[in-house]
Image (cartoon, rainbow, N blue to C red):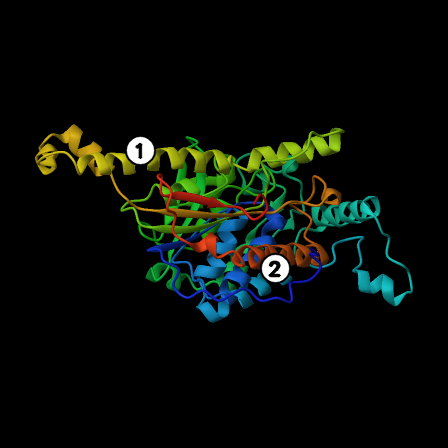
């Protein structure tokens, strides 16, 4: 399957999948996040509208662009953001520049890897337009305690971008539930900013993506927060453990793969280390949730055979146990971006237009391919009432 352009086959249209809740869960991963934009475009064309969108880091930004716009404006908002932050970085003119000069493009993974590294170096030096810019004075020469001493980049351009592209009144109106995760710097606790409990603003999105030492901690209500990916890079557990439980169709979109080959050198070792660190053991979480849900459903069946089970609720300990019983079903559709060999360790900060388009097209094609399988959206019938579907593995 080629990933240079979106598939010419459009996704099958699904109206009202048989679930009480449809959740879109977006992992963090920097420049890889345009993969999630492609996934959402395919969902939009299939008329599958999530009613809960949750994200971490770049996933929080994508989530805000989706939840903070009317359905017909969501894909255009994603496109405006990703086209804004991606342009030909320092020292790396676009392919069209070389084509106009009659210079043939290098071919092969090694050449592609070198080009990507040059582009990534350009982003390190010049930043990414409308996202972050390098500080004029390095943090080592700034007074301790100042915001300039906390990071290499200024993220004020991101705030302006969010204010321009995201309607926070729409997010706070609660039409779509919205959650982003961050880490409280002072105690290391993981916190979710949720429009059920918070008045969401640009600072909450920036807190979720404040990855040090590149970006400074974000201040929210007097507290400082860092990127949620430092503790957990996926909002899967937050959504699955929410109360009250509902029949849920969840699209889990990961930008890092927990599965990979053994690294053969220091460069591939760094790549593999990042994949393991930020994949957040999504499969382990789903396996654990399956076990817990099997027990909840078994408990529910057991209570059906207990005479006068309602009387047991008078005991606080038994009432807590009874409250765990349910017969809800969960279908987790897992999409994972599998990086090309030539992308290297800089894949999460290589913000070139060409690479962005490749990631976007890959996400779109993966979602289209997934939606060709109706079983991905069908209700589970197994004992635990939980089914995971991953087109890359099945």
Residue 71 lies left or right of residue 35; in this view the side is left
Question: What is the tally of numbered marks visible in this picture?
Answer: 2
Mark 2 — residue?
Answer: 82
Q: Residue 176: percent from the left, percent from the top?
A: 37, 59
Residue 244 lies left or right of residue 114; in this view the side is left
**Quarter of the image where one finds residue 363:** bottom right
Q: Residues within 10 Å of mark 2 (few under 14, many from 20)?
A: many
Along the viewing direction, whichever of 309 and 246 lies nearer the viewer: 309
**Quarter of the image where one finds residue 150:** top right
Q: Residue 233: percent from the left, percent from the top?
A: 50, 40
> CB atoms at circles 2 and 1 under 8 Å apart?
no
Q: Residue 24: percent from the left, percent from the top?
A: 45, 53
Question: Helix, strand or loop at disc 1?
Answer: helix
Along the viewing direction, whichever of 260 and 256 lies nearer the viewer: 260
Residue 287 in view here: yes
Q: Earlier in the sequence, mark 2 or mark 1?
A: 2
**Rendered residue at 66%/33% (across/down):** 272
What mark, if any, has residue 30 been given in the picture? none
Residue 184 in view here: no
Along the viewing direction, whichever of 122 and 8 lies nearer the viewer: 8
Mark 2 or mark 1, whichever is nearer to me: 1
* Vertical arrangement, residue 231 with respect to residue 340, above or below: above
* Most distant residue in the bottom direction: 72
Q: Residue 153: percent from the left, percent from the top?
A: 62, 46
What mark, if any, has residue 295 been given in the picture? 1
Residue 274 lies left or right of residue 375; in this view the side is right
Inter-mark Cα distance, 2 to 1: 43 Å
């Amino acid at each position: 399957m080629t990933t240079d352009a979106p598939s010419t086959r459009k996704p099958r249209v699904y109206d009202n999948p048989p679930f009480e809740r449809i959740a879109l869960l977006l992992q963090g991963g920097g420049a890889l996040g345009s993969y999630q934009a492609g996934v959402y475009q395919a969902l939009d064309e299939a008329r599958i509208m999530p009613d809960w969108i949750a994200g971490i880091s770049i996933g929080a930004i994508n989530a805000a662009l989706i939840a903070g716009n009317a359905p017909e404006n969501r894909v255009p908002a994603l496109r405006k953001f990703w086209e804004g932050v991606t342009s030909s970085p320092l020292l790396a003119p676009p392919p069209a520049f070389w084509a106009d000069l009659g210079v043939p493009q290098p071919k092969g993974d090694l050449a592609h890897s070198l080009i990507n590294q040059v582009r990534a170096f350009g982003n390190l030096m010049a930043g990414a337009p409308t996202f972050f810019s390098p500080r004029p004075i390095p943090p080592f020469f700034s007074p301790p305690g100042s915001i300039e001493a906390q990071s290499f980049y200024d993220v004020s351009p991101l705030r302006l971008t969010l204010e321009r592209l995201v309607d926070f009144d729409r997010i706070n109106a609660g039409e779509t539930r919205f959650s982003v995760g961050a880490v409280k710097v002072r105690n290391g606790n993981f916190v979710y900013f949720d429009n059920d409990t918070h008045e969401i603003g640009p600072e909450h999105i920036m807190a979720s993506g404040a990855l040090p030492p590149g970006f400074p901690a974000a201040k929210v209500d007097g507290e400082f927060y860092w990127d949620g990916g430092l503790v957990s890079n996926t909002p899967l557990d937050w959504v699955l453990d929410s109360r009250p439980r509902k029949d849920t169709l969840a699209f889990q979109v990961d930008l890092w793969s927990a599965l990979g080959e053994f690294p053969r050198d220091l460069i591939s070792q760094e790549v593999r280390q990042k994949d393991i660190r930020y994949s957040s053991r999504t499969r382990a979480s789903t396996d654990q949730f399956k076990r817990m849900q099997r027990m909840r459903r078994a408990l529910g069946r057991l209570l059906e055979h207990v005479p006068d089970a309602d009387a047991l609720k008078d005991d606080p300990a038994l009432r807590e146990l009874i409250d765990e019983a349910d017969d809800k079903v969960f279908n987790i559709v897992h999409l994972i971006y599998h990086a090309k060999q030539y992308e290297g360790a800089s894949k999460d900060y290589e913000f070139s237009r060409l690479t962005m388009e490749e990631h976007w097209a890959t996400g779109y094609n993966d979602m289209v391919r997934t939606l060709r399988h109706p079983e991905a959206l069908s209700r589970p019938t197994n004992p635990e009432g939980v089914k995971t579907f991953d087109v890359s593995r099945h």
